[in-house]
Amino acid sequence: MKKRHEQKLIIVSLFLLLAFNMPLMLLFDSASSLEGIPLIYFYFFSVWLFSILISLLIIKRYYE
């Protein structure tokens, strides 16, 4: 794997470390909901999905 692809995956990992940090997650821990889904669940799964998609794009470009 090229060094720049490894660096991009490390940046995604650091983003996830910050995104799933407890003080930031507590900002979304409220009684409000988005279309029936509690806001903290929506935040958690949207960040998770975003990181999977970004990682997929990085890995896919590596194999081309």
Image (cartoon, rainbow, N blue to C red):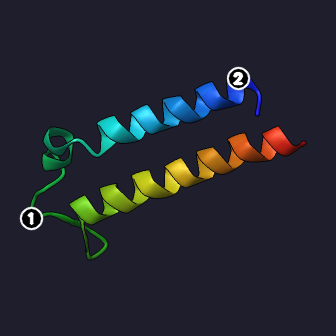
Q: Secondary structure at mark 1?
A: loop
Q: Residue at x 76, y 34 (%)?
A: 1
Q: Nearer the viewer, mark 1 or mark 2?
A: 2
Residue at x-position 50% and y-position 58%: 49
- Specify the quadrant of the image occupied by residue 3: top right
Q: Position of residue 20 (x, y in %)?
A: 28, 46
Q: Label 1: which residue?
A: 31
Relative vertical location of residue 13 with respect to residue 42 in this rendering, above or below: above
The one of 32 and 54 positioned closer to us in this rendering: 54
Q: Examine the rendered structure and indicate whether residue 50 appears above or below residue 37.
A: above
Q: Is residue 64 left or right of residue 55?
A: right
Give residue 48's position: percent from left, percent from top: 44, 55
Helix, strand or loop under label 2: helix
The amino acid type, in three-letter code, at marker 2 is Lys
- Around disc 2, counting alpha carbons within 10 Å, would you say few (fewer than 14), some (14 to 19), or many (20 or more)? few
Q: Quadrant of the C terminus?
A: top right
